[in-house]
Image (spheres, rainbow, N blue to C red):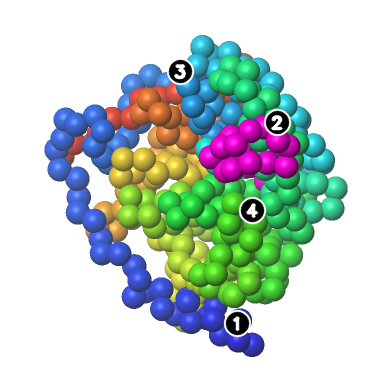
Amino acid sequence: MRRIATIAWGAAAVAALLPAPSPSPSETTDPDAGPVQPVGEATSIASGLTTPWSIVFVENGSALISERDTALVKERTAAGGIREVGRVADVVPGGEGGLLGLTILADGGTSANASDGPGHPWLYAYFTASGDNRIVRMPLRGEAGGYTLGPAETVLTGLAKAGTHNGGRIDFGPDGMLYATVGDAGRPERSQDPGSLNGKILRMTPTGAAPVDNPIPGSVVYSLGHRNPQGIAWDADGQLWASEFGQNTWDELNRIHAGANYGWPLIEGVGDSPGFVNPEYQWSTAEASPSGLEFTRGTFLLASLRGQRVWAIYDRQQVEAVPHFEGQFGRIRDVAAAPDGTLWILTSNTDRGIPREGDDQIIQVQLAPITAG
């Protein structure tokens, strides 16, 4: 009873925590300023991928990509080539499950294998195993253009799996904690159960422990009432946001607060119901089906699967969303802001879409500041 009361209090208090609206942008010529929008011609910079799911950038111009159904991690090198880094052990693909989100911890200390040496980077992976969804981490060995994976160490296990609603996005927040989005795995009642890790956004230490300042003592649950969140990003103030698949009516973009309840399965979209937090923005499911979420230069970029577009989202006097590339690339699973300031767009047409020539691909496009008028 005490845990449920803690969650309810977090939801009720969230309105007082919301930041003040940000001002509208002024005219600028600074290429590092924001907000931004995609401009110019989009170019394919990698092709022939199979059910790619996540992009993460590493040093020296390389990026790593997860392939859901092959369990492979692939490297897109600075020279533009694609090579296999390694296959993640124990992945059991099926339906929407398989090798999902990736993230990097640049200096996570030593591993159990002394040959990895101190201070090596860790590659974290969220994936579907034979009996559950889980998070592991692997030493990332070697150098750009020749990375390999060391043996996996367990971070978190026991997340219920299903053919759908596995969630799967992971990333490190500005607080150094690891965050994970977990779907309800086809059983909506889990989302309102604080004792279940499904239908939640989780927050944990890099080794999977519950931080002492989490809303439920001893639990990695950070927020609840989610259906199938697949995107997380932090804005310039360090505020966490998440994108979430609705059922039949509304997809959501939510501002996430510790202990807050986002309503599923009792509420879908804006409900204005006491104890539950409204989304900051909602779309019909035909317009979005949102997956990867990125924040760069004052702008959120959101990948849409069924909607087949990238949404540019601005938190001004109210949240505004502008579509780009509608239908041009098919289904879009992830978006990532590259170190060179461009946007990378990861297509998802080899799962349930209609593959086009070269699919699946990484598409690169320039981002430029929006100017007044």
Q: Residues within 10 Å of mark 3 (few under 14, many from 20)?
A: some
**158 with respect to 168 (left or right):** right
Residue underneath mark 4: 207
Q: Earlier in the sequence, mark 1 or mark 3?
A: 1
| Amino acid bearing label 3 | Thr
Q: Earlier in the sequence, mark 3 or mark 2?
A: 3
| Amino acid bearing label 4 | Thr
Distance in Å between CA atoms under marks 1 and 3: 50 Å
Whole-percent x and y of residue 239?
39, 57
- Which is more foreground, mark 1 or mark 3? 1
Residue underneath mark 2: 115
204 in magenta: no
Residue underneath mark 3: 43
**43 with respect to 88 (left or right):** left
**194 with respect to 293 (left or right):** right
Q: Earlier in the sequence, mark 2 or mark 4?
A: 2
Residue ID at (73%, 49%): 154
Residue underneath mark 1: 4
Q: Residues within 10 Å of mark 1 (few under 14, many from 20)?
A: some
351, above or below 234, in the image = above
Q: Which residues are magenta?
A: 107-126
Among the 4 quarters of the image, the one containing residue 301: top left
Distance in Å between CA atoms under marks 2 and 4: 20 Å
| Amino acid bearing label 1 | Ile
Whole-percent x and y of residue 137?
67, 43
